[in-house]
Amino acid sequence: MINEQFKDWLKTLRREFHRIPEVNFREFRTQEKVLEILEELGLKGLPIANTGVIATIEGKGKGSTSTIALRADMDGLEVTEEVTSMNREYISLHPGFMHACGHDAHMAMVLGAARLLMQQKDDLKGSVRLIFQPAEEQPPGGALEVIKEGGLEGVDAIVGLHVFSNIHSGEIKFRAGPFMATSNIMTITITGKDGHHLSPQLCIDPISMASRFIGCIHTEIKKRVPEDRFILGFGKIAGGSQFNRTPDEVEILGSFRTFDSKDTGIIENSIKHTLDRIMVEYKNEAFGNLPVYELEILHGNPVLVNEPVFSRQALTVLKAHFPFVSEDIEPFFGAEDFAHYLNEIPGVYMGLGTYNEKMGITEGNHSSRFDIDEDILVRGAEALTTIVLDYLEQPEKYLRKEVP
């Protein structure tokens, strides 16, 4: 039964985590805090993925022997937190770092679910694996390390939850099938021929080629992939040293996202073909094989696909217990390494709204003024608990195969 003491405990947990943001496999104090709280709950936490933690609730009830996992990410961001009217009591104590994406809340909610489940341990059918994962924000992400080190061994299904700043506070939204995008980083190096601007005929200008590429690549891709199925942008272009000299090299950094591996392949080919064409256009036989380019594409998180059968059963049970639960959310271009877990086992990833205009909680995730409506912590802990209990009672409803 939820009481004020439980609500206050969750709020305190979230604020304790919020004060100590750490990043990218450096979540040492956070790890200590998670281990400490698990011990208070009567659970043995074990380190994993360097700074992560796993623990298992072993139910004593008769029946299912299935195991379901709950995952919380642990890392903060390299963001300097601004003082607001709300955060003075719990603002980051680590200058230059902040829990600007809600991972502090995610840890609190999974720990809250663990506390509720421990109260029912004697009747709990099956087991619950708790995964506190480091380095979600830094591709390729900590999920791969958790998997590599056996964090999913013996686990049959998994559930994750993220606070969404664009969804009204307390609303739960998710969808079956593709939900979040794949992220890909591209590095392009164009090599031309350097020289003085006085003699352009003796140069092959990589800045001009880079500009040409950036100016036309969106149009080229849209000939092959509908505009609503991808995004592409550039974050850095670097080359040259002075105003009147053509450099010999320019580097372009950018990224693109899709919801489908086929679209990813089409975009990669479009980038290559466009660069090939530009190299031909700027070809000068006097300079041998110049210009040339190098293209490196780093594939980040895969498309996050909520398993359809699992998702629909989770939606059904949540709708029966909570208001404002829906699947009326379109896939969006955020990327999450939770996708790696869903490539291994069935499960679902959900969004929990925290937008509350009356409270002034309107800033987006990753903002230096980001905060949450702490009333949602109970909703998140209860939602996770509800899915776990229903799953362990009747796992066949979540895991059965759809008929083609």
Image (cartoon, rainbow, N blue to C red):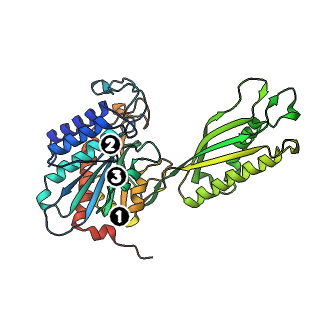
- Judged left or right of residue 112, residue 166 is right
User: Helix or strand or loop: what does disc 2 sit on?
Assistant: loop
Residue farthest to the bottom? Answer: 403
Name the residue located 72 percent from the left edge and 36 percent from the top edge: 249
Q: Residues within 10 Å of mark 3 (few under 14, many from 20)?
A: many
Q: Pick whichever of labels 3 and 1 is earlier in the sequence.
A: 3
Residue behind mark 2: 51
Give the amino acid at mark 1: Phe
Q: Amino acid at mark 3?
A: Gly
State which tag comes first along the sequence, 2 or 1: 2
In the image, 192 versus 166, the foreground residue is 192
Residue type at mark 2: give it: Thr
As measured in the structure, the alpha-carbon distance from the residue carrying label 2 to the one carrying label 1 is 30 Å
Q: Nearer the viewer, mark 2 or mark 1?
A: 2
Most foreground residue, 163 or 159:
159
Q: Is residue 235 above or below residue 56?
A: above
Q: Which residue is mark 3?
A: 160
In the drawing, does residue 276 fall left or right of residue 33? Answer: right
Along the line of sight, the residue nearer the viewer: 41 or 279: 279
Identify residue for label 1: 310
| Position of residue 191 measured from the top left corner of the image (x, y, whole percent) | 73, 40
Give coordinates of residue 42: x percent, y percent: 14, 48
Circle 2 residues within 10 Å: few <14, some 14–19, many ≥20: many
Q: Please, what secondary structure does the residue beneath circle 3 have? A: strand
Q: Earlier in the sequence, mark 3 or mark 2?
A: 2
Q: Residue at x 39, y 62 (%)?
A: 344
